[in-house]
Image (cartoon, rainbow, N blue to C red):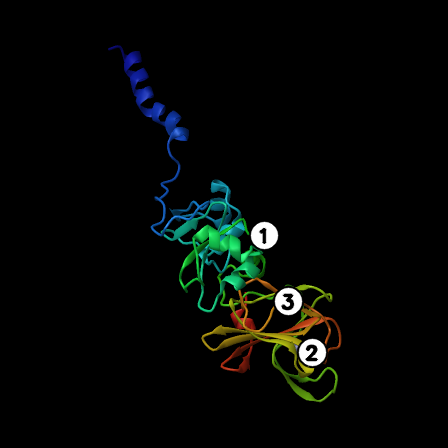
Amino acid sequence: MSKDAALAVLFGLFFLPLLLLPFLPQEDLGGPLSFPPTPGGNFRTYVVKPGDTLAAVADRYGIPLSYLVASNGLSAPSVLHPGQELVLPQGGVLHTVRAGQTLADLAATYGVSQEVIRKANGLSGEPLPGQRLFIPEPRTVPQAAVLELGGEGGTRFIWPLRGRLTSLFGPRTHPIYGTPDFHTGVDIAVPEGTEVHAAAPGTVTWAGTRGGYGLLVIIDHGDGYSTYYGHLSRILVHVGQFVEVGQVIALSGNTGLSTGPHLHFEIRKFGEAINPLPLLP
Ligand SMILES: [Zn+2]
């Protein structure tokens, strides 16, 4: 073999495989998940690789980012770590039922009728905690709020809304009475009618007027944690309802003892108000 021919062969050996690269499978997707397949639902698992971002994975597989967040119970946009297994849902959200979450709650959360959820999952009664349900083509995916109201590190709570902090937690002079006072939460200045999101999943334990709070919603998140949303103009949930993180629970307002449109937001631990900032993004 001539020197030129040998070079040509070597060239081929080295570079032909490179030319084939674009046609090789890009990702090793796992097989279907082991739970019973649901009509219209097609799920696979994906193992996160170094450098993966949620947005990139969503983009690569043509899955709405919100579906990925909701199907994987993610608490922040960048919580991915290599080796982590992600559910890749298609045509809907794969929801993991939480304790206390009923079919009616899920219907309200996703804007899908109970009948549609029942049919898609062959459900006859109420779902069980931990059960995975396929929610076909949800009208809203509240968990997507963690992308804007959550933090990079993934905190226990997300902001109920974004706005200027006008009063922090702690001792202060009462804005109306001018007397020494202890502020049990933070005040966030927002125009009246701004959507208020649940800072974490949980059960609504109060939805109505309460003294200086005006229109108030309280959500019990378990582990001793609860959150308070005060001075609301309109409440969109009822006592006993289980709401998802990010779900719109009310519209902000100026009711009760309030000097202007804002949201009063509290986090309590075993009933005692604590400084919410360390638990927020
Ligand atoms: Zn306040």
In the image, residue 138 above or below residue 217? above
Task: Determine which residue is flagged by label 1.
Answer: 139
Local SS, label 2: loop
Crowding near the residue tagged with mark 3, few <14, some 14–19, many ≥20 C-alpha atoms within 10 Å: few
Q: Earlier in the sequence, mark 3 or mark 1?
A: 1
Q: Nearer the viewer, residue 163 or 205?
A: 205
Q: Nearer the viewer, residue 52 or 207?
A: 207
Local SS, label 3: loop
Mark 1 vs mark 2, CA separation in Å: 31 Å
Q: Is mark 1 within 8 Å of ligand 1?
A: no
Image spot of residue 154 (x, y percent): 49, 62
Task: Determine which residue is flagged by label 3.
Answer: 236
Mark 3 vs mark 1, CA separation in Å: 17 Å
Confirm or deny contact between disc 3 and disc 2 (CB under 8 A): no
Question: Which quadrant: the C terminus?
Answer: bottom right
Identity of the amino acid at label 2?
Gly
